[in-house]
Image: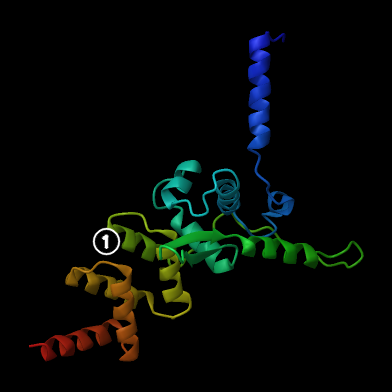
Amino acid sequence: MAMNEGNNAWAKGMALGMEAGMVNIPYPLLAHYRKLRLSDTEAMLLIQLLAFQQIERNDFPSIEQLESRMDMAPGTLAPVIRGLLKEGWISIDETVDEATGIHSEHYNLHGMYKRLGEWLAAQPSAASGRKPVDSAPDVREEPERNLFVIFEKEFARPLSPMECETISSWVDQDRYPEELIRLALKEAVFAGKVHFRYIDRILLEWSRNRVRTAEDVKAYTQRFRSGMR
């Protein structure tokens, strides 16, 4: 189809714009993400994080921005981010501006490159006879997904990536039972202090006093409140 001079100039401009806006994506991520046990959603999330960093100079897009970009329903992306954090594909780093003292967070994708490099290095040669890693199903089980939903309901807003990581650390690192985390949230709501630092202090206090079950919480709370009278 013939193009007039104006359309030709516009087409050239668009082509240059697309060239200037290209995102560098590791080929192994595109070619082998299923063998790396990533779902379609997880792989696309990593690609979107690369795009935000490289094109928009945004190292810490909000969950709402990512959900909008990926056309996902509100609240559905937090468990995916949590899974990538737990698996070591991404991390969230915090920095402090020495001049202003302002704290800022950003996604660190070093884990992704590390995982890709390790996977490539581990691939067998044709003569080795070893089988490649089987592809994984699209849906990853998320044991703590209900916790995210409960917290978002009580907070009346989507959780931030750092808040998701906090919940994950309570479960995976501190080994707090999920029931105990829900009770700590309930206690914070009762006290009118619905924020993560207060909930974390409750969990720490309970841990120090060997409070591990709902019955322990009930007994400890009764003793604590009786002592305040």
Where residue 53 appears, as percent x and y from the top left, is 57, 50
The residue sitting at the left extreme is 229
The residue sitting at the right extreme is 127
Looking at the rendered structure, the kind of residue marked 1 is Glu
The residue sitting at the front extreme is 99
Quadrant showing the C terminus: bottom left
Q: Please name the residue shown 88% across and 63% down the image.
A: 125
Where residue 5 appears, as percent x and y from the top left, is 68, 10
Tell which of 197 and 140 is nearer to you.
197
Tell which of 94 and 199 is nearer to you.
94
Q: Is residue 217 left or right of residue 23?
A: left
Where residue 156 appears, as percent x and y from the top left, is 27, 55
Which type of secondary structure does the marked residue at label 1 adopt? helix
User: Mark 1 Cα within 10 Å, few/some/many (few <14, many 20+)?
Assistant: few
Q: Quadrant of residue 205?
A: bottom left
In the rendered view, tell whether residue 31 sits above or below residue 102: above
Quadrant showing the N terminus: top right
Q: Is residue 130 left or right of residue 105?
A: right
Residue at image mark 1: 154
Q: Please name the residue shown 63% across and 18% down the image.
A: 10
Tell which of 222 and 26 is nearer to you.
26
